[in-house]
Amino acid sequence: MNRKPKSAAIIGPFAKSLLALIVGCSRVYAAEVDITKLPPPATTNVDFIRDIQPILENNCLRCHGPEKTKSKFRLDNREAALKGGEGGVDILPGKSAQSPLIQYVAHLVADMEMPPIGKGDQLTSQQVSVLRAWIDQGAAWGKGAATNNVAFSVSPIFGGTAVSGDNQKFREQYWQKDGVNGGVEKFELFEQTSPDTKVLATGHALLNDYKLELSADRNDVGFIHSGWEEYRKYFDDTGGYDPKFFPIAPKLGQDLYLDVGKAWVDFGLALPDWPRMTLGYEYDYRQGDEATLEWNAVGKTIATTRNIGPNSQILDEGAHIIKFDLDEELNGVSIEDRFRGEFYKLNTSGSNVSYGNVPQSVGEGTTYFQGANTITASKKFNDWFFGSAGYLFSRMNADSSVTMDAPTLLQLASAPRITLEKESNIGNVSGLIGPTSGLVISMGAQAELTRQNGFGDGALDEEMAPPVTSNTVVPFMLASKYDEASLQENLSVRYSKIPFTAVYAEARLEQQNIDQYDQFSSSQNILNKAVFLQHTDFSSQLSNLRFGFDTSPWQMASLSAYYRRSQDDSEYDSSPLVQPIATAYPTFLLDRQVINNEFETKLVLHLTPRLKTSLSYQYQSDDYGVTTRPFTSFGAVIAPGGELIAGEDHANVFSVNSTWTPVPRLYLSGTFSYQSSVLVTAPDGTGPVAPYRGDVYTALANGTYVLTKTTDLFAGLSFSDANYAQNNYAAGLPLGIEYQRRGVQVGLSRKFGKNVSARLQYRYDYYDEPSSGGADNFRAQSVFAVVTFRFW
């Protein structure tokens, strides 16, 4: 089950974001502001909805909106904006140059730059000019804040798709079922009952794809956000393909899919002078029958048996999540606290067939509770230094069970009681320094301690075949211990005072130590193991260096490039392995080295106002090396030991992207990419193990022609061709993929007045996959019509 626990959603970003710098907005007055540095106000008539609202939503409302109000200054309605915040009035209608808001967004006041440095991109001169014009023209607001304003829109859709060939492959690729389809593509109901209160309902309802979101917000009080969504993920039921022994790829003959969904509700409190608090609940689930890559054996003899039989498992997974968030600002220090508690349950069941048509039914179950809490504090100490620190604590208690039933072998193995306890402590500190103009230095460090213990027991119940009728029950015990300590350091430097150019360098170092212990014991041999004992100390040193530049010496051209190199050296210090029959693994490795080199460059050309083109090239290589112990079996030398080149992976990627307006009302865009790669493993040259080689071509093209003021014509073309596989039909089972994929779409959209618009489109898709022997091939034709009605 490849699933990250939901509570890891606050662990992953915490562990990776060493520079999460949240800057306070406490007011600092400048002794003098040089307003001559302001860009002039725009000369056009400003429309709030068109020109101002996007600037506020993208740059300001995250900290100065109804859900979060720093310095008690809000920019989501005119009354609050003109009232100002803790430091006084920020907008002076008719006097943009004297308005503190303009001085802040133009970065003329030290320590009061908005958005704060490190929290967002500085507004462009054009955006500042538009804001100045808006204030000079009276700072008019949009009509959206009017009381009892109601708006409703709905877009019903109807159509269908006809598929010839493998309809399950079509469903897997396009996430929709063939046949008649329709519903509501989008609906939205908005009501603003007062300047401070708004209600919104939005979503869609299609075949096996539903979403509903409800929200109610009241300024200076809080909000309720809730919703439910569910969609269906389809899977193809085709197995592997070996033309030598199985000219037709096997299929399960089942309709495989998972229904994936979640429901949630969040209650937020946003009272003035109070910390902002959010209490929420979420339920995530996945249910259905999914395809797996644990393929079954197909064949009647050893020589003809191939593990290409498709397989699936029934899955029932759910997680109840409790959330609590708190945000506060004290004396210029921003404090964030995040708690997640997850109650998780998973049940799976499936079957597989090994050589000789020996079926095995496997069932697994897992339940756990994981609680995780992070707290971070950050502060802008002065105009050149920001700092932050954080701590995470996580604890998980899990119970699992597994059962494997092989009735043909008269065997039943079960481990009904497996427990796991895991605890993690993670702390980090980071800083952002700007000692001189144009120079920015960021640094951080993070330490992690994790401890994990597992224990379980079970039994193997083996029935003797007739004429002997007796059972042998062999109990066994399992135990494991895992301790991890790691330290990570980050440093980056960026300098932008070279004319038209910025250069940067980044470094990341990581040291990791793991102590792992595994034990299995039983009263008799089970699969040649009565006692199994492994103890390994693992250590690694990772270094990752990256440097590059961005330059734009001419208005019509810009060039960027970077080079990155990483090296990971690992050592395995294992105690002598205890097992009845030596198999070398898992103490076979002594050390491992992975070296990655990556280079990328991009050239952007804006030759004319109507043509913009970008060209890029990327090269990536990975080299894997190991040192092993010597190993012999029955007098034969299986591995002599020593250094070994385990594998190499190389790829070249070329791409071109262009947007072009050859004549007025005609807009064209296109992308083309080509990738060539090869993957070679250590025993290259032997029959069964052959290198992967191949090329992938991808092209996308779109065009829109404005026929009239109310009618647009549009068309699209997609093309993909892949040939990435092994060439070992004679000596082994070839793996990889080879396919050709084409798609063409045409349509038109038309407006019927202000309240009605429509769209009609046709699409043809072609898919051919020689690596499946044609079993996955399909052709599809789709026609859909959408009509949108708006009422207000």
Image (cartoon, grey):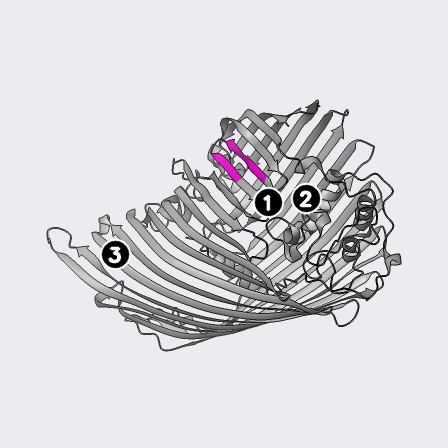
Residue farthest to the right, as pictured = 36
In-image side of 746 versus 462 (left or right): right
> Label 2, on which residue?
77
Residue type, mark 3 in image = Ser
Quadrant containing the C terminus in the rendered view: top right
Which numbered disc, 2 or 3, marks the residue closer to the eye?
Answer: 2
Residue 445 screen position, x and y as percent: 58, 72
Principal SS element in the magenta part? strand
In-image side of 243 versus 576 (left or right): right
> Label 3, on which residue?
414
Decide whether residue 583 is among the magenta residues: no
Please state the extent of the stretch shown in magenta in the rendering.
198-214
Q: Are marks 2 and 3 in contact (CB under 8 Å)?
A: no
Decide whether residue 200 is among the magenta residues: yes
How many angstroms separate mark 1 from mark 3 (CA)? 44 Å
> Label 1, on which residue?
722
Residue type, mark 2 in image = Asn
* Residue 5 to residue 626: above or below: above
Residue drawn 63% across the image and 53% down it:
69
Residue 374 screen position, x and y as percent: 50, 63
Mark 1 and mark 2 lie on one chain; the one further toward the N terminus is 2
The foreground one among 502 and 64 is 64
In-image side of 130 versus 778 (left or right): right
Would you say residue 655 is visible in this rendering?
no
* Residue 324 to residue 768: above or below: below
Residue drawn 66% across the image and 24% down it:
755
Assign a secondary structure to mark 3.
Answer: strand
Which numbered disc, 1 or 3, marks the residue closer to the eye?
Answer: 3
Q: Are marks 1 and 2 in contact (CB under 8 Å)?
A: no
